[in-house]
Image (tube, rainbow, N blue to C red):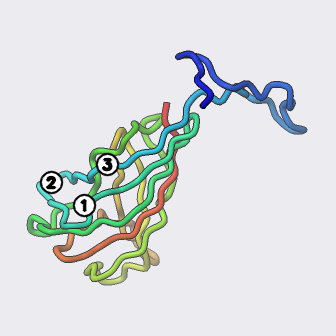
């Protein structure tokens, strides 16, 4: 086991900055793996599947897993409100990859996207020739999720 003092890391400065850009850091100073139990806004409650896993390397966080909805609170807007790390910036336009089962999407929806804000991951339905709509929670539905975002 290699133990590095707090505030330090492994330097890759000897490898150079690449041909076309400049780097702001070549120091690997953070790595973590873990899991968390999903919570939702708007009194939506998760079902038996509610654990997501994450890996954090530097300022990138990748989370993945599956969750389901137990109580949709009258189809309230569905979004995760407890990501393990806060997004960098006020809006994070990293798009989650999702697959859903038994989710009743609104008429005309052609897919689900999303965006991050603070420690939230908000889902929206995409439509052809129409504005996106916030995704409504749906009791008994499940979502497979993969999402990578930047943190501070």
| Residue 115: percent from left, percent from top | 42, 53
Q: Is residue 27 left or right of residue 152?
A: right
Q: Residues under labels 3 and 1: Cα distance?
A: 18 Å
| Residue 8: percent from left, percent from top | 61, 18
Q: Residues under labels 2 and 3: Cα distance?
A: 19 Å
Residue 105 placement: quadrant: bottom left
The earlier-in-sequence mark between 1 and 2 is 2
| Residue 150: percent from left, percent from top | 52, 41
Which quadrant holds the N terminus? top right
Q: Are marks 3 and 1 in contact (CB under 8 Å)?
A: no
90 or 59: nearer the eye? Answer: 59
Under tag 2, what secondary structure? loop
| Residue 25: percent from left, percent from top | 70, 26
Label 2: few (<14), some or many (≥20) within 10 Å?
some
Label 1: few (<14), some or many (≥20) within 10 Å?
many
Q: Is residue 57 left or right of residue 17?
A: left
The residue that mark 3 highlights is 36
Q: How many marks?
A: 3
């Amino acid at each position: 086991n290699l133990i590095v003092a707090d505030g330090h890391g492994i330097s890759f400065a000897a490898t150079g900055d690449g041909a076309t850009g400049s780097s702001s850091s070549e120091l690997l100073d953070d790595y973590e793996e873990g899991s968390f139990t999903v919570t939702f806004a708007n009194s939506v409650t998760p079902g038996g599947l509610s654990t997501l896993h994450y890996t954090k390397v530097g300022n990138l966080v990748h989370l993945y897993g599956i969750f389901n909805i137990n109580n949709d609170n009258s189809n309230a807007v569905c979004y995760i409100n407890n990501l393990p790390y806060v997004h960098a910036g006020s809006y994070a336009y990293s798009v989650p990859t999702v697959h859903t089962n038994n989710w009743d999407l609104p008429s005309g929806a052609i897919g689900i996207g999303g965006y991050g804000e603070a420690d939230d991951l908000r889902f929206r339905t995409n439509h052809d020739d129409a504005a996106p709509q916030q995704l409504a929670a749906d009791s008994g539905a499940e979502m497979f999720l993969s999402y990578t975002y930047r943190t501070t």
